[in-house]
Amino acid sequence: MVVDAGHGGHDSGATTRYGGKEKVLALDVAQRVDAKLRAAGFKTVMTRKGDYFVELNKRVRISNMQMNAIFVSIHFNYSPKRSVSGAEVYYISSVSKSIARNILNQLDALPGTASRGVRTANFRVLKKNQFPAVLVECGYLTNPGEGGRCASESYREMLASAIARGVIIQRHGNR
């Protein structure tokens, strides 16, 4: 299992007055997901454990060095329209679609969260991965309500629990 905290270092990702810096929130959620998956018996690797930048190709190399790992990249979204909200999960390979669906179903069950769907995208971290890979957009930092929730430690704990449950459900479904 590879847990990837999006952005880092000089790359702040989305930054808003409602939610703060994406790189900080993504790392926090990723660390929480990592701890939950380890507690559930997964062997995990994180692409970054602090506020430093890891190049996209290196994130993929880290993932591809793990045997049969699931790669989960954690992000928060941005839109010029403050009204846009909701979680979405991206994948590219057909073997990743059910993982994306499981994670989104768990996120969608959180209070105040709306589903924006499971989508395909040509993101480098998805395209170059040899094993199942998904990218999770936990919510829109530019939406005042959702950005405020994402800034909350208790909500980030719920996000991490939902993402971890989605991965655990996938593992149990494949036995």
Image: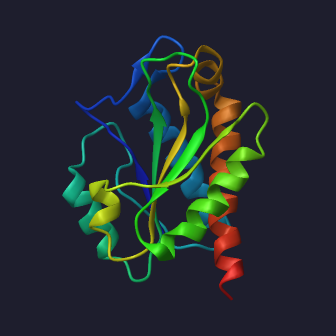
* Residue at the (42%, 71%) spot, across then down: 93
Compare residues 91 and 16 and report the one nearer the observer: 91
Compare residues 26 and 42 and report the one nearer the observer: 26
**Residue 60 position (above or below residue 137):** below
**Residue 113 position (above or below residue 35):** above
Which residue is the extreme one toward the top?
A: 17
Compare residues 98 and 3 and report the one nearer the observer: 98
Position of the C terminus, as image quadrant, is: bottom right
Give the x, y percent position of residue 149. Answer: 66, 24
Give the x, y percent position of residue 18. Answer: 54, 14
Left-right relation of 32 to 137: right
Question: Which of the 4 image quarters holds residue 110?
Answer: top right
**Residue 157 position (above or below residue 124):** above
Left-right relation of 20 to 58: right
* Residue at the (50%, 19%) spot, across then down: 142
Left-right relation of 49 to 115: left
Compare residues 132 and 93 and report the one nearer the observer: 93
* Residue at the (36%, 41%) spot, across then down: 50
Give the x, y percent position of residue 158. Answer: 71, 42
**Residue 34 position (above or below residue 77):** below
Question: Which of the 4 image quarters holds residue 157?
Answer: top right
Left-right relation of 148 to 125: right
Which residue is the extreme one toward the bottom?
A: 175
Give the x, y percent position of residue 92. Answer: 40, 64
Question: Which of the 4 image quarters holds residue 121?
Answer: bottom left
